Image (cartoon, rainbow, N blue to C red):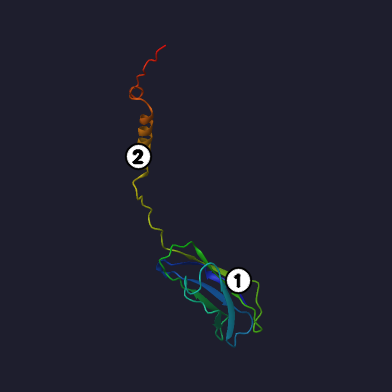
Amino acid sequence: MTITAVDAAAAEAGRDGGSFRVTRSGPVAASLTVAYVVGGTAANGADYERLLGMVVIPAGQASASIEVRPIDDAAVEPRESVIVRVAASAAYAVGRSSLAVVQITDNDRPPPRTATRGTAAAVAQQDLSAVAAAFAALVSPNEAAGTKKSSPS
């Protein structure tokens, strides 16, 4: 039993799904239930429609698909992964390609940042004015005007 990601790129935008294909070798006369384990950074049932952990390959068929259907939520998220691994079973042998990944891309953007107390230039100007006022308070009126009193010698 092997698994591949036949569409490894899914997205919340437009609910663009991804998919895995589970393939068996050998006789196809009877249907075969294949168990799988789901993991990854995306939450099963929250970031995509719940995957149940088993898929049936119908009689006469060599493979079956597992569809990943993203859920378009309002959360701003990084790209997330859905990892599916074929589980061991007495009914089939697990092949070398027993794990595959589908990535889900988010379509939400963080809200724009806004200044609450003025722009950076206005804040800098306020700071500069405060420094100038503090300096002026420290020097005498003549010194602030650029003239110095001559000191008696």
- Under tag 2, what secondary structure? helix
Indicate the amino acid at tag 2: Gln
The percent coordinates of residue 18 (x first, y second) are 49, 70
Looking at the picture, tell me which residue is in the foreground, 99 or 141: 141
Q: Residue furthest top?
A: 153
Upstream in sequence: badge 2 or badge 1: 1
Q: Residues within 10 Å of mark 1 (few under 14, many from 20)?
A: some
For marks 2 and 1, give the CA distance. 60 Å
The percent coordinates of residue 29 (x first, y second) are 60, 88
The residue depicted at 36 percent of the width and 32 percent of the height is 132
The percent coordinates of residue 62 (x first, y second) are 58, 80
Residue occupied by mark 2: 126
Query: Which quadrant holds the C terminus?
Result: top left
Query: Which quadrant holds the N terminus?
Result: bottom right
The answer to whether residue 27 is left or right of residue 69 is: right
The percent coordinates of residue 143 (x first, y second) are 36, 23
Q: Quadrant of residue 149?
A: top left
The answer to whether residue 137 is left or right of residue 34 is: left
Select label 2 or label 1 by which is in front.
Answer: 2
Q: Residues within 10 Å of mark 2 (few under 14, many from 20)?
A: few
The residue depicted at 65 percent of the width and 75 percent of the height is 95
Residue occupied by mark 1: 99
The residue depicted at 38 percent of the width and 35 percent of the height is 131
Indicate the amino acid at tag 1: Leu
